[in-house]
Amino acid sequence: MLNIAICDDIEAELRHITALTKEYLAYRHVDAEVCEFSHPDDLLTACEIQVFHIFLLDMVMPMVSGMELGRCIRRVSTEAQIIYITTEPGFALDAYAVNPLHYLLKPVDKDTFFTAMDLASEKVNFGDEITVTVKTRDGLRTLSVNAIACCEYSRHTVAYTLASGERVETVTIPGRFSDYIAPLLEDRRFLQPHAAFAVNMSRVERLDKEGFTLRGGIFVPVSGKQFSAVRGAYMNYRLGEA
């Protein structure tokens, strides 16, 4: 299913773009969930626990600019399709720093909007989303890697800490921890800085010699012998975002 996020601080504009989006989805017979946000912070919080494929963003907002919002989105998703919708044509060139798909001017023309949405829908690649399925005492559970802040190995079980604060603990796992988390490490945001930990670098606020401090105050240690390599990997990740 297609997940679409719309963010505009002006209620009337938010309703209008939402209505256009739903009209498009009905016209194209697309199964999708549309989420509306009037504040960028609410959208970014939602991105921590949900995967969005298409973002429709206002460019000019008093809280956080659409440009900065786009940069934040790119930190967690390089594949998402971003469409800016605004009254200010002067920002178009700057906006392309976050690689948006399209830049539409208000008032939005229906045909132009539908064309942009067609292009965005065609570019969505559901197969690139990485999930991990874990076996818990309550049964199997599939986690989006976007929702995982870190995981810890202890006594032959793995505890996943999610961005929402929830902890998901597995039953006893076979084999080595490094083999178990190999699918998770396929995502460039993830790193194993310690024999018993893996961390989502997009959640990191600070790195020192002791380890990573994540948003929400979560601490993930770094093995002393690996510190230089871990620091280098983290710096490469952050520089790759710019």
Image: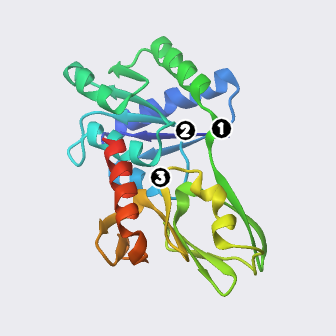
- Disc 1 is placed on an element classified as helix
Label 2 sits on residue:
53
First in sequence: mark 1 or mark 3?
Answer: 3
Which is closer to the viewer, label 1 or label 2?
Answer: 1
- Going by the image, does 207 lie left or right of 156? left
Label 3 sits on residue:
47
- Disc 3 is placed on an element classified as helix
- In the image, residue 108 above or below residue 235: above
Give the image location of residue 211, x and y in percent. Answer: 36, 74
Label 1 sits on residue:
126
Give the image location of residue 42, x and y in percent. Answer: 39, 55
Quadrant of the snapshot with the C terminus = top left
**Of 241 and 193, which appears nearest the observer?**
193
Q: Residues within 10 Å of mark 3 (few under 14, many from 20)?
A: some
Q: What residue is at 41 percent from the left and 50 percent from the top?
A: 43
Badge 1 vs badge 2, beta-carbon distance below 8 Å: yes
Residue 191 seen in this snapshot: yes
Q: Residues within 10 Å of mark 1 (few under 14, many from 20)?
A: few
- In the image, residue 128 above or below residue 196: above
First in sequence: mark 1 or mark 2?
Answer: 2
- Going by the image, does 84 lie left or right of 28? left
Three-letter amino acid code at disc 1?
Phe
- In the image, residue 27 above or below residue 49: above
**Of 19 and 232, which appears nearest the observer?**
232
Snapshot quadrant of residue 12: top left
Three-letter amino acid code at disc 2?
His
Residue 218 seen in this snapshot: no
Cα gap from disc 1 to disc 3, whole angstroms: 16 Å
**Of 180 and 164, which appears nearest the observer?**
180
Quadrant of the snapshot with the N terminus = top right
